[in-house]
Each structure stands twice: as C-alpha cells, then as structure tokens.
Image: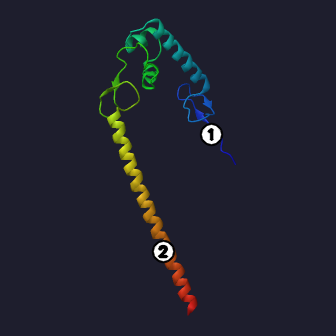
Amino acid sequence: MNKLNIKNCARCKRIFIPVSKEKICPDCRAADLELEEKVKSYLRDHPGITVNQLIEGSGAPAKLVWRMVQQGQFENSALKDAQYPCGRCGKLITRGAYCTECADKLKANAQKFAAAMNSKRRAAEKKAQTFSDSMYDAMDNSRER
C-alpha cells in the first residue's frame, strides 16, 4: 500500500503534495519565480548596484535575494558586493554555503566517517559469519555423535 506524502507549505501553511523534496506549495513557488524574475529585471535595468540596493529597489524579500546569490544566479552580472560569509569559517564567498577550503575539509571528514562506518559494518558482518559458521560446525559435530 502506497503512503500518500503530504506536507504543509512552509510559507502559507496550506497542504500540498510535494513532487520531490519541496518545502513550499506550487502557488508559493510560482510567486517566488515571479519575484525572482522581477529581481533579475531590476538588476538588468540598474547594473552596478549593491545587494542591499537590489533588495530595496526590487521589493523582494532579502532572504529570497540572498538565496539567489548563494545559488549563483548573479555570477555573471554587474551586481556589486554580492558576498556573504562562509557557513563554517566566515570567509567572504560569492556562491554556495561554504568556501572551497571548508567544503574540502567537510568532504574529507565525510569520507573518513563513511570509511569508518564501512569498516565497522565489515567487522560486524565477519563476526556474524564466524558465529554462523561456528553454529553449523556445532550442529555437524552433534550429528556425528
């Protein structure tokens, strides 16, 4: 039996069925896309402005504009000072959540963790196999008597 996956929209609280891992309903997403187009249009009409001027002039929420900056939507534009701090070390970056150095460190740590977990899993499997083998040996020995 299939479980119907429904959520409440993080913005308007209406119930919706997400297509993937969406947190907002299609109506709010459409409104976001419309605002994003408005922001891009404002930037095209006012090249060389700062992020704060873009937020003020476009009327879009700061959170939306900064999300667009993080996603790299303004990388090739004339937007000035589109920098924000790395989520780990505070170094100013222009895209993503972490600077290159922190992203590399986090990736290395994740790989070390995965290797440790795989090692534990293999050890547990070996222990289970050894136990299973010893059980079969014990059963064989009892049959031989």
Report crowding for label 2: few under 14, some 14 to 19, many 20 or more residues within 10 A (C-alpha).
few
Considering depth in this image, is 57 or 71 the residue closer to the camera?
71
Locate residue 24 relative to residue 77 in the image: left or right.
right
Residue appearing at x 44%, y 6% in the figure: 46
Disc 1 from disc 2: Cα separation: 41 Å
- For label 2, the SS is helix
Against 119, residue 59 (above or below) is above
Tell me if residue 65 comes above or below residue 22 in the rendering.
Answer: above
Q: Residue furthest top?
A: 45
Look at 37% across and 24% down and name the residue there: 94
Q: Which residue is mark 2?
A: 131
Give the percent coordinates (x, y) of residue 111: 39, 48
Kind of residue indicated by mark 1: Asn
Of 76 and 39, nearer the camera is: 76
The residue tagged with tag 1: helix, strand or loop?
loop
Of the two numbered discs 1 and 2 on the same chain, state the one appearing first in sequence: 1
Q: Quickly name the residue at label 1.
A: 5
Query: Residue at position x 70%, y 49% from top?
Result: 1
> How many numbered marks have been drawn onto this rendered protein structure?
2
Q: Where 100 falls versus 70 (above or below)?
A: below
**Residue 52 found in image quarter:** top left
Q: Is residue 141 left or right of residue 85?
A: right
Residue 89, percent across and down? 29, 33
